Amino acid sequence: MPAVARPLSLAASIPVPHTAMVLAAGLGLRMRPLTLTRPKPLVEVGGAPLLDHALDRLAESGVARAVVNTHHLGAMIESHLADRRSPAITLSPEDELLETGGGVRHALPRLGTDPIFVVNADILWLDGPTPALKRLAATWDPAVMDALLLLMPTVAAVGYDGPGDYHMEADGRLRYRAEGELAPFVFAGVHIVKPELYQAITETRFSNLKLWQQAEEAGRLYGMRHDGVWFHVGTPEAVDEVNTLLGHPIPHNAKLSQPRTAEP
């Protein structure tokens, strides 16, 4: 089954996952000194915090509920999201960092059993003619896929200078690059996955890459090429670069909501 999006006339009738996991618990070490006083997902890029960009895209695509994990300066994220209604927010606090896969596994009781979107809260993408989340939903086929990753051509990823992540076959199946090898696609921080895959992993702390490796070995890891623009926002310099490109210069000392104090 080729992993290509279905025609829009058909895609319009395909349900989008109703729940998403948004990964917002990281320390943001490469983004210091900005992340000394705020969590990385609340760094403003393109006129809004990175976290809001992700949640707005989810809401626009019809996702009803988002589970957001927190750790570093988590009270600031809680305060920032207190008034958001779309998507509805459920927090998943982590006493210790569980990495990307461990964070999803920890949140499983809040996620349900249907396929979910998993979105990194420290990325920024602009959609092409059809929103990327809807294209992923139209491409998703649980009969042959355990995970479907949004991919960006490595050479077109703004602010990214790494070796890439994956090779993609004509039918959409993925192969992770060998050591020392360059790959034409980089993971763009968004994917659809079956939650039950996380239940099969016994570790509490692990990367999503572990789960994808298992899916790849089973021939059930697929990818879809993003047809819009994607920004790698990993450092303060990258924040300045992306803001300049988008025409939204944001000073590094922009004020953020402070954590709410407990009511008596």
Image (cartoon, rainbow, N blue to C red):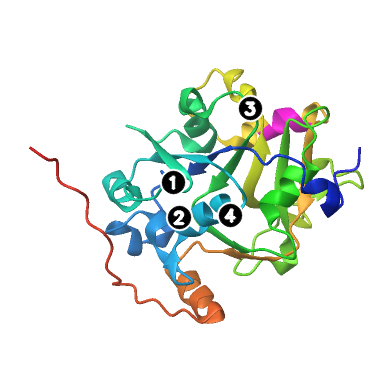
Q: Which residues are magenta?
A: 212-216
Looking at the image, tell me whether mark 4 or mark 1 is earlier in sequence order: 1
Q: Residue at x 32, y 32 (%)?
A: 95
Looking at the image, tell me whether mark 2 or mark 4 is earlier in sequence order: 2
Q: Secondary structure at mark 1?
A: loop
| Main SS category, magenta section | helix
Dot 4: within a 10 Å radius of its alpha carbon, few (fewer than 14), some, or many (20 or more) residues? some
Looking at the image, tell me whether mark 4 or mark 3 is earlier in sequence order: 4
Q: Nearer the viewer, mark 2 or mark 4?
A: 4
**Labelled disc at residue 51:** 2
Looking at the image, tell me whether mark 2 or mark 1 is earlier in sequence order: 1
Q: Which residue is mark 1?
A: 24
Using the numbered discs, state the Cα–Cα distance from disc 4 to disc 1 in whole angstroms.
20 Å
Using the numbered discs, state the Cα–Cα distance from disc 3 to disc 2 in whole angstroms.
23 Å
Using the numbered discs, state the Cα–Cα distance from disc 2 to disc 1 in whole angstroms.
8 Å
Using the numbered discs, state the Cα–Cα distance from disc 2 to disc 4 in whole angstroms.
14 Å
Q: Amino acid at mark 3?
A: Asp
Residue 56 placement (x, y as % from top left): 52, 56
Quick one: 200 or 210, which is closer to the camera? 200
Pointers 4 and 3 in contact (C-beta within 8 Å): no
Q: Secondary structure at mark 2?
A: helix
Residue 221's place in the image compared with 40, above or below, is: above
The quarter of the picture where the N terminus appears is: top right
Q: Quadrant of residue 14?
A: top right
Looking at the image, tell me whether mark 3 or mark 2 is earlier in sequence order: 2
Q: Which residue is mark 3?
A: 114
Q: Secondary structure at mark 4?
A: helix
Q: Which residue is mark 4?
A: 60
